[in-house]
Image: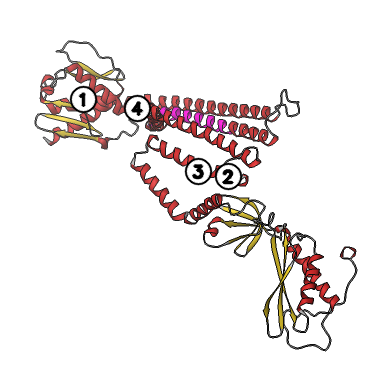
Amino acid sequence: MKCAGRLFSALAFTVTLAAASAPPAFAQETASAGYSVRLEGAELFRVRRPLGPFTAQERAQRIEERLQAAADDPFFSTELVQVEVSEREGRLNYRGETIGIVTVEDAAAEGQPLEQVVAERLERTQAAVARYREQRLPAERSRTGLYLALATASLALLLSGVTRLHRRFAASDALSKPHEPPRSVNVLSQPMAALVQTVRRRGLAWARIAAFCALVLVYLEVVFALVPLTRGFAQAILGYVVSPLLTLWGGFLARIGDLFFIAVVGSLTFYVLRFLRWLSVHAQRGSIQIPGVDADHALRLYKLSRIALVALAAVMVFPYIPGSGSAAFRGLSLFFGAVLTLGSSGSVGNFVGGVLLLFNRLFKVGDRIRVGEVEGDVVELDLMVTRLRTPKNEVVSVPNGIFLSTHATNFSARAATDGLILHTAVTIGYDAPWRQVHQLLRDAAAKTEGLMTASPAFVLQRALGDFYVEYELNVSTRDAAAKEAIYSRLHQNIQDEFNRAGVQIMSPHYVADPAQPKLAALDTEPVAKR
C-alpha cells in the first residue's frame, strides 16, 4: 500500500505538470474510449469513468485546466504537492486545492492494477513536463524581455514628451504678453496679477507630476503583468488605485443629497460673510453708521460675527458630512477638542477680553492709554491683542486678557472736551512765601505751549514736611499724546522762573541751609539758537 501511495503521488505530480500546458480543446471521442488529457498537444492519459456529478469529459477538462495553471505557477515546487491516499481513491492537492482524484474504478477501466496505471502515467507526464519547461519557458522569457524593453522605452519617450510640453507651456505663460498694453481696464492690481501667474505656474507643475504618476502607474501595471512572478502585484496595484475611487464614487452617489445640503449652507455662509465685510468696511470709513458700534470697532465686530457664523454653519453641516458618525471621526473630534481645551485656555481669556472691549468701548484707535506698566497710543484693536505705540516709538502687543485682571487708564477719553489735567510737584523751603511760590508756578504754566488757556492753572499745597512744603501745579491740555513734551517744557519753565526769583527748589532732599542758595545761572539764549 505504501508503494501504491508513492506511485500515486508521483503520478499526481506528473499529471499536474503535464496538464498545465494542454490546450482547452478536447478530443471528442466515445465514452468507452475516454477523454484525453493533453499537454502541448501530446496525450498523457485518458479519463474513462465519471465521478459523482461530473462526467468523464468534465473530469478531463478540469484536470487539464488545473494542471496547466500549476505548470504556469512561477513558484511551482514538488514540495507544494500533497497526496491523500485511502483504500478506494487517491486525492491530489496542490497549494491546498484539489487537482484531481484517481479511483479504483479508474484503474479497473484501464484493465490494470492501480499501481501499474500510476507508474505509466507518471512516466509519460514527467517526459511531457520536461519538454514543456525546456522549450516553452525560455521562449516566453525572451518574449517577455522584449516587451519589457519596449515598455521601458515607451515610458522614457512619454516622460520626455510630458517634460517638453510642460516647458513649452511654462515658457508661453512666462512670456504671455507682459509688455503689451491691456485691451481693457485691468481690475486686478499688480500683486494680484503676480499671484495669478504663480498659481498658473504651480498648476502646471502639479499637472506634470500627475502625468508622471499616471504614466509610471501604467508602466508598472504592464511590467508586472508581463512577468509571471509579479502578476499578482499588478492586480494589487490596480486594486489599490481603483478601490478608493470606486468607494469615493459610491459614497458620493449615496450621500449626494447631503452634499447638496452642505453646498447650499456653504454658499449662504460665504455670501453672508461677504455682505458683513462690505458693511464693516463702509462702517469703518464712516459712510454707513451701525447703531451702537463705533467706526473703530466695526472691523472687530465683523471678525466676531465671522467666527460665530462659521461655527454655526459647521454645527449645521456636521451631521451631513460623510463618515461623521464613524468611530474614527468621533475619536478625531474628541482628540482635537481635548487639544483645544488644554492648549487654548489663555486664548479664550484673550478672546473674552476682546469681546468685552468691543462692547464696553473703553478706548479706540488713537487714544493714549496706560495698561500696567505700558503706556502708549492705541494703533490696532484685535479680538486677541491690542497694540500700543509707546512714546519711544515701540509697538507693544498687550493680550486682551490683561484687561480682565488689571485696570487701564485712558488719557484721551475726556481730553478733547474737558481737557486732561497734568500735574507736577516741587518742594520749597519754609522761608519762601507760599503766595510767591504759587505765582511763580502759574507764571511757568502760562509760558508753556500746549496748555489750555480756558482752564487756568492752579496750585495745591500737598504736604507740610519737616523741612519744606510740597506744592503741586495742575494744568490742562487737550493733546494727551503730547503730554511728555508738555511736561518737559513745563519743568523747564519752572526752573527758569524760580531761578529768576532767587527761590531755591529743595528737591529731592533737604539737609541744611547752604551758605549761598543753590541757583542755576540764567540762560537767556533761546533754545532754537543753540
> Which residue, given by chain and number where applicable, does mark 3 sit on?
307
> Which residue, given by chain and number where applicable, does mark 1 sit on?
121
Q: Position of residue 272 (x, y in %)?
A: 52, 34
Residue that extends furthest to the left in the rendered view of this protein: 87
Going from N to C along the chain, the mark reached first, 1 or 2, is: 1
Q: CA distance from mark 4 to mark 1?
A: 18 Å
Q: Is residue 495 magenta?
A: no
Amino acid at dot 3: Ile
Q: CA distance from mark 3 to mark 1?
A: 83 Å
> Which residue, given by chain and number where applicable, does mark 4 sit on?
133
Q: Position of residue 123 (x, y in %)?
A: 23, 27
Task: Tell whether label 4 touches label 3 (CB within 8 Å).
Answer: no
Q: Position of residue 68 (x, y in %)?
A: 29, 24
Which of label 2 and label 4 is nearer to you?
2
Left or right placement of residue 73 versus residue 422 in this view: left
Element at label 2: loop
Q: CA distance from mark 2 to mark 3?
A: 18 Å
Element at label 1: helix
Amino acid at dot 2: Val
> Which residue, given by chain and number where applicable, does mark 2 sit on?
293
Going from N to C along the chain, the mark reached first, 3 or 4, is: 4
Looking at the rendered image, the quarter that the C terminus falls into is bottom right
* Location of residue 468 (image quadrant): bottom right
Amino acid at dot 1: Arg
**Range of the magenta residues?**
205-228
Which of label 1 and label 2 is nearer to you?
2
For the residue pair 240 and 437, the one nearer the viewer reads as: 437
Q: Main secondary structure of the magenta part?
A: helix
Q: Residue at x 67, y 52 (%)?
A: 366
Camera sees residue 227: no
Q: CA distance from mark 1 to mark 2?
A: 101 Å
For the residue pair 249 and 26, the one nearer the viewer reads as: 249
